[in-house]
Amino acid sequence: MGVADLADYPWDAVAPYAARARAHPGGIVDLSIGSPVDETPEVVATALRTATDAHAYPQTMGTPALRAAIAAWFERRRGVAGLTPDHVLPTVGSKELVALLPLLLGLGPGDVIVHPRAAYPTYEVGARLVGATPVASDDPAEWPAATRLAWVNSPGNPDGRVLDVAALRSAVGRARELGAVLASDECYAELGWEAPWDAEPIPSALDPRVTDGSPDGVLAVYSLSKQSNLAGYRAAFLAGDPALIARLLTARKHLGLMLPAPVQAAMVAALGDDEHVAAQKERYRRRREVLKPALEASGFRIDASEAGLYLWATEGREAWESIGRLADLGILAGPGHFYGTHFPQHVRLSLTAPDERITAAADRLRAAI
């Protein structure tokens, strides 16, 4: 299978519902895509402007300052100490890494790639791109013997589910038993809402309580898109097993997968400043506290959603019916069908809309009761 064989982009199917939502007298409230709407922090923008003299090719491995900043951030914010420059690698956003990781690891036909049951579709795209077999499973005990890459996603997209230390230990242990790489997508880890994640850090797959102090076979993927409003910068990174990092670095050098030098400088600034992250989290908290009770009052049940950027909701009917009902209120959401075959009655609603639009959505939901 090649790129030309991939299915049509699924979001095209939402277009008719977007048109219905735009016809609402009060305008559309687009909660379908998790694209940040708030300003890029000034500390980051200043760093970018200062680094515009970028006449030389950037380093695929990242500047020494960036690699040190990633390692320091993992220790300060994720409880993962002891990372060196050999343990980390910047990426051009996280989506390209998710899609290309099977290719960069040399996987292909006969190999199994596991991903969560409620899953960002790019995990499956990456498997199909190389002819591997994607398998949706949340239970490591079910992972097939042919598994060579296993994705976990905590907090989850779309469902906001958090894997605790015990669950991550189980996943890492099973991957090591199978000789597979365990890749943990952790891009929403700063956005914990419900106990215990409102008070304690969400664990990383690289946490020593998970790995017994060894990163062998484990990779953690992270993005600054959400916590720092840097989606347009394509600023992400991975960390973990230095042997795997070295393999990926060599492949990425050949492919020219390098971050622009000004973006690398901006990432250093973002990773070193926790204040803007706390401020952005508070914005999302306020929006969640407005939207969640309005959805519940209008007949939706919120499942999981204990962390992350989305509300995973169902009213016990076919997802497209819920999408249509919401569209008639001028609200656009994403159907559960886009995240696998297991949740045909769920919809995903993002917190990435301006306060006024979130309030408008809540008012419309309550008025329709």
Image: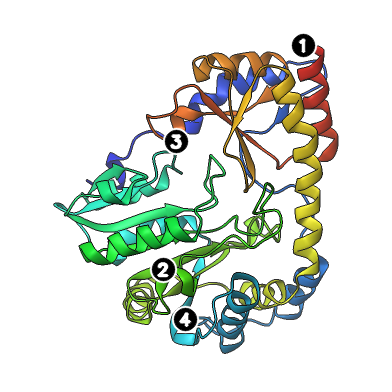
Q: Residue at x 56, y 57 (%)?
A: 187
Sequence-wise first label, 4 or 3? 4
Mark 4 touches mark 3? (CB < 8 Å): no
Q: Amino acid at mark 1?
A: Ala
Q: Name the mark nearer the viewer: 4 or 3.
A: 3
How many residues crowd mark 4 within 10 Å: few (<14), some (14–19), many (20+)? Answer: many
Sequence-wise first label, 3 or 2? 2
How many residues crowd mark 2 within 10 Å: few (<14), some (14–19), many (20+)? Answer: many
Mark 2 → mark 1, Cα distance in angstroms: 46 Å
Sequence-wise first label, 4 or 1? 4
Mark 2 touches mark 4? (CB < 8 Å): no
Q: Residue at x 34, y 76 (%)?
A: 216
Of the numbered discs in the image, which one, if any, rests on residue 61?
A: 4
Mark 3 = which residue?
Answer: 339
Q: Residue at x 79, y 74 (%)?
A: 46
Res 296 → quadrant: top right
> Which quadrant is home to the C terminus?
top right
Q: Which of the pair 321/53 is nearer the observer?
A: 321
Mark 2 = which residue?
Answer: 219
Q: Amino acid at mark 2?
A: Leu
Sequence-wise first label, 1 or 3? 3
Mark 3 touches mark 2? (CB < 8 Å): no
Res 364 → quadrant: top right
Mark 1 = which residue?
Answer: 368
Q: Which of the pair 352/278 is nearer the observer?
A: 278
Residue 205, given in percent of the width and then of the height, sits at 46, 65
Name above or below for residue 152 compared with residue 8. Answer: below
Name above or below for residue 341 compared with residue 78. Answer: above
Would residue 2 be found to the left or right of residue 268 on screen?
left
Q: Amino acid at mark 4?
A: Met
